Image: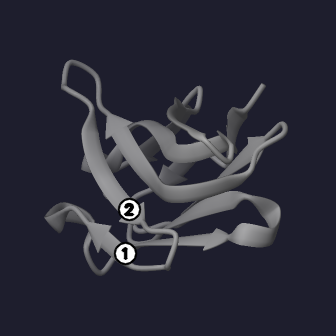
């Protein structure tokens, strides 16, 4: 059973940094794109960043220049380095990935979410 397990959330002051990690566990064949989303209280879930299997990246405008997504394919792990954090970055952050559990079946998986709180 493939799962995405997140870690690294917490409470930080504005201007600080946090690094989120998300590891794919279980038996799997390969991983295509990996992504981060976030959901603030009372708001819809928002896409934050993507990294493709080839390493290309993309970001929502509000985090460009402050956040960096990366991956370690040997560890089946995606990271989100968050710098210059603002109170409006407060949200539950979710990782998402397109995973081939076998060579013929690809599915989308979600992590359980990790809380990031930025105090002013």
Front-most of 16 and 78?
78
> What residue is drawn where x is 62% and y is 70%?
71
Answer left or right for 27 relative to 4. right
Crowd band around label 2 with a 10 angstrom C-alpha radius: few (<14), some (14–19), many (20+): many
Residue 59 in the image: x percent, y percent? Answer: 27, 67
> Please, what secondary structure does the residue beneath circle 1 have?
strand
The answer to whether 6 is drawn above or below residue 30 in the figure is above
- The quarter of the picture where residue 114 lies is top right
Q: Of callouts 2 and 1, which one flags the residue occurring earlier in the amino acid sequence?
A: 2
Residue 9 in the image: x percent, y percent? Answer: 60, 44
The answer to whether 78 is drawn above or below residue 29 in the figure is below
> What residue is drawn where x is 21% and y is 61%?
60
> Please, what secondary structure does the residue beneath circle 2 have?
strand
- Is label 2 in contact with label 1 (beta carbons under 8 Å)? yes
- The quarter of the picture where residue 15 lies is bottom left
Front-most of 95 and 119?
95
Residue 1 in the image: x percent, y percent? Answer: 78, 25
Crowd band around label 1 with a 10 angstrom C-alpha radius: few (<14), some (14–19), many (20+): some
Q: Which mark is residue 105?
A: none
Front-most of 82 and 35?
35
The answer to whether 101 is drawn above or below residue 19 in the figure is above
Front-most of 68 and 14?
68
> What residue is drawn where x is 67% and y is 49%?
8
Farthest residue toward the front?
104
Farthest residue toward the top?
42
The residue where tag 2 is placed is 50
Answer left or right for 24 relative to 10. right
Disc 2 to disc 1, C-alpha distance: 5 Å
Q: Which mark is residue 57?
A: 1
């Amino acid at each position: 059973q493939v799962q995405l397990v997140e870690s690294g959330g917490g409470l930080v002051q504005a201007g600080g940094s946090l690094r989120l990690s998300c590891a794919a566990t279980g038996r799997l064949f390969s991983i295509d794109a990996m992504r981060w989303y976030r959901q603030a209280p009372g708001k819809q879930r928002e896409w934050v960043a993507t990294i493709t299997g080839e390493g290309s990246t993309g970001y929502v405008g509000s985090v460009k220049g402050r956040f960096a997504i990366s991956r370690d394919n040997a560890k089946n792990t995606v990271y989100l380095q968050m710098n210059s954090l603002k109170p409006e970055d407060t949200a539950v952050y979710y990782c998402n990935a397109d995973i081939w559990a076998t060579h013929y079946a690809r599915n989308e998986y979600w992590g359980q979410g990790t809380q990031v709180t930025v105090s002013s």
